[in-house]
Image (cartoon, rainbow, N blue to C red):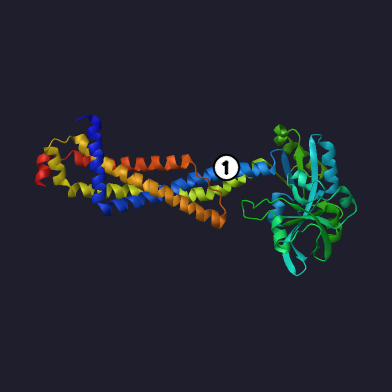
């Protein structure tokens, strides 16, 4: 018999044994499936995190920086967070020649917003007429407010699509007047849909009004803003600008060397780090779970196959007496082990896919399945099958024909 024919015959005998020993197969398959599901989820979650990071960086703007008032220590201790002034905005605009947009922003959270008998608590942001440009967030209905609206402290605004749906339902919001606290604001435009942040915050739940209007009429403020957003023409020098901006603002705020920054700069790099860290906790948990599950699955396979060798001693002896070689016996048992772990790997991949749907629906976690996740899962399942099936296969192959038949 040719080697190919011998191999096919051994494979066929392995498949028959897998079908014959159903309980053993089920135990081994389930053990492997849980381990492979965890590992596959790790790979998919890692890929999803990086893909989401790239999407968010593209949305944030690879040429952009966001500077918040208040340093990290100030936020942790509850100290004053408004440290950026309108004069800072003008100074940055003058000092950085490649900054083609420098836009101030100030925000108020959980502000009562109403239209007729419908009420909602939303985010109200004050900015300039460049808000939609600086965020690459187009107005899809109506029009943007203008510089004249900002200079004139006018009560006009843009609305996000989620808030528009909550307040207006199927009505066209453009031209309608809402109340922000007790101030009437005419909606002049609707922003395009943006979805949610990685932490689940709705980006479309907001109203944008002129920064002069929110500062004077809602905050009684003339000097401080919450943040500024900057976009540079030379984005290849973005991280050099981060350091330059830090030095510039520290000098303007007259901070001693030993004092921490009283502002926080967010760049695309920080966004990527945040998402990777967010994924890290799940990866660590699933990694430990997956490794433990695979090791347990391996021991289950090894023990059940050693038991199977004892149960099938006579069968092995008869096959050896009929001319089967040691390698034939070894390959049969290894074939059974690999076949079971292959089925376990496929079941694990299906389980991981189902689990990912649950994760994305409950926590909106970024998960991306690719051929890489499938290949990693299958290679690991084969490694478990070969690694833990080798000892039982060796023991079966080394049984002496006469003793085996007697057993």
Give the residue at x 15% y 40%.
319
Instruction: Name the residue at 71% across, 50% down.
Output: 192
The quadrant the N terminus occupies is: top left
Closest to the observer, 296 or 159 = 159
Q: In this view, does 17 lie above or below 109?
A: above
The residue under label 1 is 50
Q: Residue furthest right?
A: 152
Residue 51 shows in the view: yes
The percent position of residue 273, horizontal first and vertical second, equals 61, 43
Q: Is residue 46 toward the left or the right of residue 164 in the image?
A: left
- Of residues 66 and 340, the one drawn nearer to the viewer in this rendering: 340
Please tell me in which quadrant of the rendered image residue 374 appears: top left
Frontmost residue, 172 versus 98:
172
- Given the current orientation, which residue lies at the most extreme bottom position? 117
Percent coordinates x, y for residue 148 in the rendering = 89, 49
Q: Can residue 293 be seen in this view?
A: no
- Tag 1 secondary structure: helix
Tell me residue 354's x, y (percent): 46, 53
Camera-side residue of 317 and 278: 317
Where is residue 107? Give x, y as percent.
77, 55
Residue at (53%, 48%) from the top-left corner?
367
| Drawn side of residue 262 relative to residue 6, left or right | right
């Amino acid at each position: 018999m040719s080697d190919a024919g011998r191999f096919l015959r051994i494979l066929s005998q392995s498949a028959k044994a897998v079908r014959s020993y159903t309980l053993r197969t089920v135990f081994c398959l389930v053990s492997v499936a849980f381990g492979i599901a965890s590992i596959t989820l790790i790979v998919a979650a890692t890929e999803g995190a990086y893909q989401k990071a790239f999407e968010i960086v593209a949305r944030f703007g690879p040429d952009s920086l966001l500077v918040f008032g208040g340093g990290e220590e100030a936020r942790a201790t509850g100290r004053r967070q408004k440290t950026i002034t309108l004069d800072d905005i003008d100074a940055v605009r003058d000092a950085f020649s490649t900054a083609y947009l420098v836009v101030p922003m100030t925000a108020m959270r959980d502000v009562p917003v109403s239209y007729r008998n419908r009420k909602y608590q939303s985010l109200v942001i004050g900015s300039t007429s460049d808000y939609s440009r600086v965020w690459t967030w187009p107005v899809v209905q109506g029009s943007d407010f203008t510089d004249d609206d900002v200079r004139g402290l006018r009560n006009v605004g843009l609305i996000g699509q989620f808030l528009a749906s909550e307040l207006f339902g199927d009505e066209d919001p453009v031209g309608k007047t809402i109340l922000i606290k007790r101030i009437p604001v005419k909606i002049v435009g609707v922003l395009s849909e943006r979805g949610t942040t990685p932490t689940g915050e709705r980006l479309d739940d907001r109203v944008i009004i002129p920064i002069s209007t929110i500062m004077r009429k809602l905050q009684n403020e003339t000097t401080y803003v919450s943040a500024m957003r900057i976009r540079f023409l030379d984005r290849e020098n973005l991280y050099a600008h981060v350091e330059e901006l830090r030095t510039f603002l520290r000098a303007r705020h007259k901070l001693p060397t030993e004092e921490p920054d009283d502002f926080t700069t967010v760049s695309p790099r920080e966004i990527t780090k945040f998402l990777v860290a967010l994924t890290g906790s799940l990866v660590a948990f699933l990694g430990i779970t997956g490794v433990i599950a695979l090791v347990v699955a391996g021991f289950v396979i090894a023990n059940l196959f050693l038991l199977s060798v004892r149960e099938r001693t006579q069968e092995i002896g008869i096959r050896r007496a009929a001319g089967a070689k040691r390698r034939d016996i070894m390959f049969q048992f290894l074939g059974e082990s690999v076949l079971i772990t292959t089925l376990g790997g496929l079941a694990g991949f299906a389980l991981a896919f189902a689990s990912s749907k649950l994760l994305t629906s409950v926590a909106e976690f970024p998960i991306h399945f690719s051929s890489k996740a499938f290949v990693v899962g299958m290679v690991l399942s084969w490694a478990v099958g070969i690694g833990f099936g080798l000892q039982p296969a060796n023991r079966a192959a080394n049984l002496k024909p006469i003793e085996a038949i007697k057993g």
